[in-house]
Each structure stands twice: as C-alpha cells, then as structure tokens.
Image (cartoon, rainbow, N blue to C red):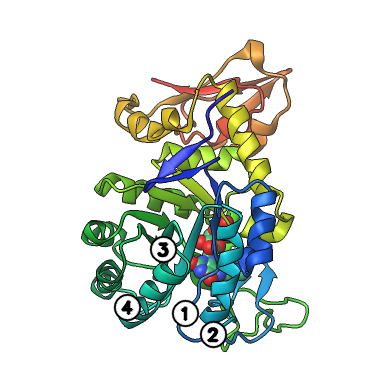
Amino acid sequence: MAELRVKVTGIEFRNPVLTAAGPNVRNGEMMLKAFEGGAGGVVAKTVSVRPARDTRPTIRKTVCRGLVNCETWSELPFEAMLEEYRKVKDAGIPLIVSIGYTPKDMRQLGPIIEREVEPDAIEFSTHYSGRSVEPLVEVAKALRESVNLPIWMKISPNLPDIEELAVKASPFVDAFVAINSYGPVLDFDVETGEPILGSEYGQGWLSGQAILPIALRIVHQVTSVQAKPVIGVGGIERGKDAIKFFMVGASAVQICSAAIRYGHSIYGKVAKEIEKWLDEHGFSSVDEVRGLFKEKLKSRKKFDGIPVMHIEESKCTGCKLCVRACVHSALYMDGDVAKVIPENCIGCGYCQDMCNFGAMWLVER
Ligand SMILES: Cc1cc2nc3c(=O)[nH]c(=O)nc-3n(C[C@H](O)[C@H](O)[C@H](O)COP(=O)(O)O)c2cc1C
C-alpha cells in the first residue's frame, strides 16, 4: 500500500488531504468532525481582528458543480476562536490557524495565537489585502517579524502577477497555499431575475470543480518559480483531482466546497482514492508523482507540422460519438467503423476525448 503520510514545513500529516478555511471548519466541533472524516490535518476558518458580518444568503450553487459565496471571515470574535482551537490541539490533531488581512492585523493576531494556541503553523489569507504584489508582501513580512511558527501564505487567483508575488514573498513564508476562491463572479435566479447572494451587488466568489484548472495553473506557476512547498486547493472532489495537484508540484491538498456539498467524510474518501490510484499505477508515495507534469511538459514529443487523427479500427466500436463531435467535418462512418478525411482534419484532438475505447490518437501526417 502506498505511503500517504506527508511532512510539510516540518508538520507530519497522516495523509495529504487537509481542510481548507471555510464554514466546514468554523469551530472546534466542525474541526474535530473533519478529522474524524479522515482529514490529514485541520486548517481553521480565517479570523481577523473584528468578527465578520455577512449579509445573507452567503452560499449558493452555480454552474459546473461550483459554488458562489459571499462569506468573508469568521463571525466569531477571535478571542472566542482561541477556545475552539484548543479543542483541536488537545486532541493532538495538526492545526493550522488562518488569519487576515493587514500588516497591522498580523502584528496583533500572530503573537497572541502563537502564545495562546501554539498551532503547528499560521496560514494568512490575502483575499482582502489588496490586488497588487507589494501590499501582499508587506503582510507576509509583518507576520514573519511577529511569529516564529511556520507561515503559510494563501494566494488568491485574482492577482495580475502570481509569479512575481511568489518570488517576492518566498523569503518571508515557509509555504504557499493556492488558491482562494475566484472572482468576483455573478450568478442569479433566471426565473425571477433576483440575486441569489446577499452581497451588495449580488456578486460572490467562485469555488468547487469550476475552478480546478485555474488552481492547477497557479500551483504549477508557484512551484516553478520558487522552492517552498505549495498546498493545492480548488475544486478537489476525487483522488484523481488531488493527484493532478501533486503532479504540478503540490505537497498536500485542501478541500472546502466538496466538504460543504458532501460532508466531513469527503477528506477520508479522497485520501483513500489517492492511495488506490497510487497503488494501481505502481507509485509507492505522493513524493513519486510530485512534479510529473513538469517532466512531461519538458519531455513531450512535439509534432513537426499539423498532425492527423489516427483511428485504430480494431478498437472502434462504431458508437459515432467522435463523428458527432468533429466540428471540422473530418470524420464519417464507413459501415461500423469511424474513418478520417485527412484533408479536413486539422489535428485539434477533441474527438480523442469523445472516444471511450482508446481507439484514437494523433500521428504525424
Ligand atoms: C463558503 C466559503 C467560505 C470560505 N471562507 C474562507 C476563509 O475564511 N478563508 C480562506 O482563506 N478561504 C476561504 N474560502 C476559500 C476556500 O478555503 C478555498 O480556498 C476555495 O474555496 C477553493 O477550494 P474549494 O474549491 O475546495 O472550495 C471559503 C470558501 C467558501 C466556499
């Protein structure tokens, strides 16, 4: 059986599937339940110097199995959260406390949390700290000057230059977490035209499966430009989703939306699926798949010119899905098998994804 234990910034986790800050970990009881549900460790809901006051409704469904939310940070005063963290610490569970947002907030909250809670690390959210690089680096610096604990910097996807931020913040943090929810975005009720969220403009932040490819791109960028570990988050629902994050360089993953949608058992389910996938593919640990995408990106064979689709006739079942999907009119049925019209095929590759039988691949012309 593959080894699931991972060590990130000196913290040992029994598996690489952690909670992400959100309502799924809003208090001690929820954090304990997340651990019972199989989480490798717990990242708590973000607290700040003042409790948040969010106008309702705050969490709704949107397209592509996504969620939109206008929940900001914890509505509990941080003094009250200190008690909640202790429940997790007392149970011996790896605990990462999440705080936000300004350099002043870091200097105030960091030392209190370090002294009163002694968590394993502090994650800080940059979601409401500005949209340019320098102010966010200032937040990182302020926390570095205030605590000795490992620091995890959580990156929002809504920044123009992620790579510059990662490079400039790296000296002040021990790890990055990518990504927070994407946006702002807008969705509403088509029957009535009414907003579905209580925020001022009806806008919110997008999370869940809809943002997974955005998160993969950003984790790949951050792991490519600096050497500190990165914890991937965004749209993870299955073991395979997590494996993709490891392949772009992540050391662990976090889950929020899928825990809202499916409950606390999601963490253990994803961890088991990671183990199964590793076993089935002959890998003995998460370490062995880490960065695989980066290697393949370098070593992949590029076509000399425009390739053409090949159909392995012995594997074609005649289902016609590829023919229906070809927007270039390059495929037709010849009796029970699909055939290619090479002069029409532009080698886009889309029909290959329609074939459930592995009968199609691109070849040199
Ligand atoms: C309702 C809700 C509340 C959230 N609250 C926080 C928060 O307090 N702090 C934070 O850093 N991220 C927060 N997030 C972002 C998540 O931690 C996570 O980064 C993001 O949703 C992407 O992961 P997911 O697709 O697994 O949800 C929240 C997300 C949702 C959906």
Q: Which numbered disc covers residue 48?
A: 1
Locate the C terminus and report the quarter of the image it occupies. Answer: top left
- Cα–Cα gap, marks 2 and 3: 18 Å
Would you name the residue on which mark 3 appears?
Answer: 122
Which residue: 57% across, 52% down?
92
Q: For this rendering, which residue is in front, 322 or 130? A: 130
- Identify the amino acid type marked 2: Pro
Under tag 2, what secondary structure?
Answer: loop
Residue 125 visible in image: no
CB atoms of marks 1 and 4 within 8 Å: no
- Identify the amino acid type marked 1: Ser
Under tag 4, what secondary structure?
Answer: helix
Under tag 1, what secondary structure?
Answer: loop
Mark sitting earlier along the chain (2/3): 2
Would you name the residue on which mark 2 appears?
Answer: 51
- Cα–Cα gap, marks 1 and 4: 12 Å
- Cα–Cα gap, marks 1 and 2: 7 Å
Which residue: 29% across, 71% down?
146
Q: Which numbered disc covers residue 107?
A: 4
Quarter of the image where one finds residue 352: top right
Q: Is residue 217 above or below residue 301?
A: below
Under tag 3, what secondary structure?
Answer: strand
